[in-house]
Every structure is written in structure tokens, then in C-alpha cells.
Image (cartoon, rainbow, N blue to C red):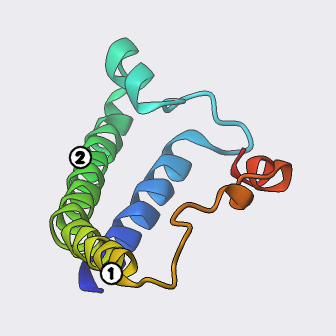
Amino acid sequence: VNIKWSMYGLVVMLNLNIVMASYGEDKDEGYTSAVSGLRDGVSRSFRVSLVITYVLGILNFCGYLVIVLFLGLTEVPIIIHQTDEFIQESLEDPRIKEYRNSSAFTWWGVTLVF
């Protein structure tokens, strides 16, 4: 839970930094994107903001990578194990005659997926 709140805070700070550097009533300076700011260069007063943007972006990327790896290493094996147990129980149950139900794949289901 703490890492999710930390990531949320980092995203808010990143968005605020970009908004303060690139939006405004008569804002002709600043940078429209971090890539263009790095490629084209920015004025001296916006260099710190550009560095903060990149640091927060890298931290966000690493944080979300940690979350995805953690879920992939913990939740996915649990789900696979539960599915294998359910399949084994279903195969041993003589009351179950049909193991696949294709009625879920109707036009409504296809429309829902897409």
C-alpha cells in the first residue's frame, strides 16, 4: 500500500512540475515535452525543471516496474496453482461432462472485450 501511495505522489509531483513549466496564459518559454526539451534545449531557468521531470519520470518507471514484477512473481504463480487445483478437482468429479463452455464467446462478449 505504501508503494502505491508513493507512486501516486510521484505522479502528482511530475504532473505539477510539467504544468508549471509548460502551461500558462502567455507562456512562450519552457518546454512542451521532456523529449523536445532535451533535444532542442531549454533556457537556463527551465533546466532544473527539466532535470526534475526526468528524475521523477525515471522514479515512476522504476516504481511501476517493481509493482509489476512483484505481482508477476507472487500473484501469477498463486493463480496458476489455484487453476491447476480446480482443473484436477473438475477432472475427478464424475458429474461434470463438459469442461469447456463456449457460450461465453457470444457477440456481446466479443463487443465487451473490444
Q: Position of residue 55 (x, y in %)?
A: 23, 47
Q: Position of residue 31 (x, y in %)?
A: 49, 30
Q: Amino acid at mark 1?
A: Glu
Q: Earlier in the sequence, mark 1 or mark 2?
A: 2
The front one of 41 and 13 is 13
Q: Position of residue 106 (x, y in %)?
A: 79, 52
Residue 37 is marked as none
The front one of 1 and 49 is 1
Q: Which residue is mark 1?
A: 92
Query: On the picture, is 93 further left or further right than 76?
Result: right
Residue furthest to the front in view is 94
Badge 2, how many Cα within 10 Å: few under 14, some, many 20+? few
The quarter of the displayed image where residue 75 is located:
bottom left
Residue at image coords 38%, 72%: 9
Q: Amino acid at mark 2?
A: Ile
Look at the picture and state if 24 lies above or below 75: above
Report the quarter where the C terminus lies: top right
Look at the picture and state if 68 lies above or below 107: below
The front one of 114 and 35 is 114
Q: Which residue is mark 2?
A: 58
Residue at image coords 48%, 47%: 18
